[in-house]
Image: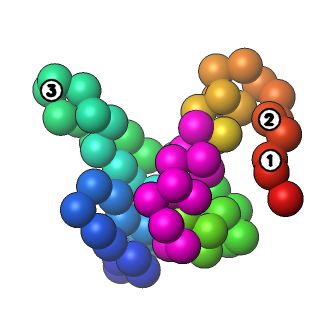
Amino acid sequence: MSMFENDWMRIVMQDDNYVIQYNSGDLANSTQEIVVSEIDALKVQESPESAYDVIIRYQNLELFGKKQNTPQ
């Protein structure tokens, strides 16, 4: 079930997890998925900028294995 949706992303619940499904922006137009916290699932709904910040933070976590500082 989709909890939130816009032109390039949506938030769904999968097995009690919040999952952001978003268009990766590649030439092939592929969809990527990131499991996020409830707080971040709410944050991405605030604005495109907030969504971008959350997605980049989780991508960095996946790539580099450490949490990035987040602005307060």
The answer to which of 37 and 8 lies nearer the viewer is: 8
The quarter of the picture where residue 24 lies is top left
Task: Find numbered disc 2 in the image and state the secondary structure of the residue it sits on.
Answer: loop
The answer to which of 15 and 4 lies nearer the viewer is: 4
Which residue shows up at 62% across the image and 68% down it? 43
Residue furthest out toward the left:
28
Which residue shows up at 38% across the image and 53% down it? 21
Instruction: Give the CA separation, mark 1 to mark 3.
Output: 30 Å
Query: Is residue 12 visible in this depiction of the protein?
Result: yes
> What residue span does the magenta drawing correspond to?
45-56
Q: Which disc, if any, is residue 68?
A: 2
Q: Which residue is mark 3?
A: 28
Q: 10 Å neighbourhood of mark 1: few (<14), some, or many (≥20)?
A: few
Quarter of the image for the C terminus: give it: bottom right
**Closer to the N terminus: mark 2 or mark 3?**
3
Question: Given contact means CB atoms under 8 Å apart, are the residues at marks 1 and 2 in contact?
Answer: yes
Which residue shows up at 84% across the image and 40% down it? 69
Query: Is 59 a magenta residue?
Result: no
x, y percentage for residue 64?
A: 72, 19
